[in-house]
Amino acid sequence: MRMTKQELDDLNRARIARGGKPLTFTEPPIQTAVSFIGAPTVKELRKLPKQKRGPSHLEEKFLRLWTDAGGPPLEREFKFHTSRKWRVDFVDHATHTAFEIEGGAFGGRHTRAAGFFGDADKYLELWHAGYSLVRLTSPQLTPEIIGRIVAKLTR
């Protein structure tokens, strides 16, 4: 889309009036109208298979601290239930200890009633399967705390 000098001046006046910076010749003007022809609808997007998410930054931090503290190897994304798709973030099979790194404390799924009750069901089934659970939040991911956990498990 090409603009005339007059159109660019009008656009810059509007940007300055809103407290923005004027466009320069090196910055192409932003198109205000976007065509969504051929884009999927919301209904079509909901039908798409859910994408698997990679490990969170908190899980990566936990694993780094765990390794630095000399902890034993852990299995990631351990599926402990035969009929449900329940998994825990990490598990140490030698001590039957599972670790859940709890994110989303400020408005995530874990803090809503359905999510909270679902997590409680999952944790109860994990206990029935013979595992102890250690739930860790982001402020607890420190070298001191992880070091204490590793020391207790490796005694």
Image: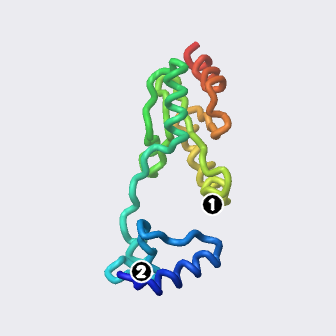
Give the residue pinned by disc 1.
114
Location of residue 154 in the rendering, given as x and y in whole percent from the top left corner: 55, 16
- For residue 47, what is the image quadrant? bottom left
Relative depth, front residue between 15 and 51 = 15
- For residue 51, what is the image quadrant? bottom left
Q: Is residue 54 left or right of residue 106?
A: left
- Against 74, residue 23 (above or below) is below
Q: Earlier in the sequence, mark 2 or mark 1?
A: 2
In this rendering, the count of numbered labels is 2
Q: Residue at x 43, y 42 (%)?
A: 79
**Quadrant containing the C terminus in the rendered view:** top right
Amino acid type, callout 2: Val
Q: Is residue 57 left or right of residue 50?
A: right
- For residue 48, what is the image quadrant? bottom left
Q: Residue at x 47, y 21 (%)?
A: 72
Q: Element at badge 1?
A: helix
**Quadrant containing the N terminus in the rendered view:** bottom left
Relative depth, front residue between 45 and 32 = 32
Q: Residue at x 66, y 57 (%)?
A: 107
Q: Residue at x 44, y 36 (%)?
A: 76
Q: Classify mark 2: residues with Cα within 10 Å, few (<14), some (14-19) or many (20+).
A: few
Residue placed furthest toward the front: 5
Give the residue pinned by disc 2.
34
Q: Element at badge 2?
A: loop
Location of residue 4 in the rendering, given as x and y in whole percent from the top left corner: 41, 85
Q: Nearer the viewer, mark 2 or mark 1?
A: 2
Relative depth, front residue between 59 and 114 = 59
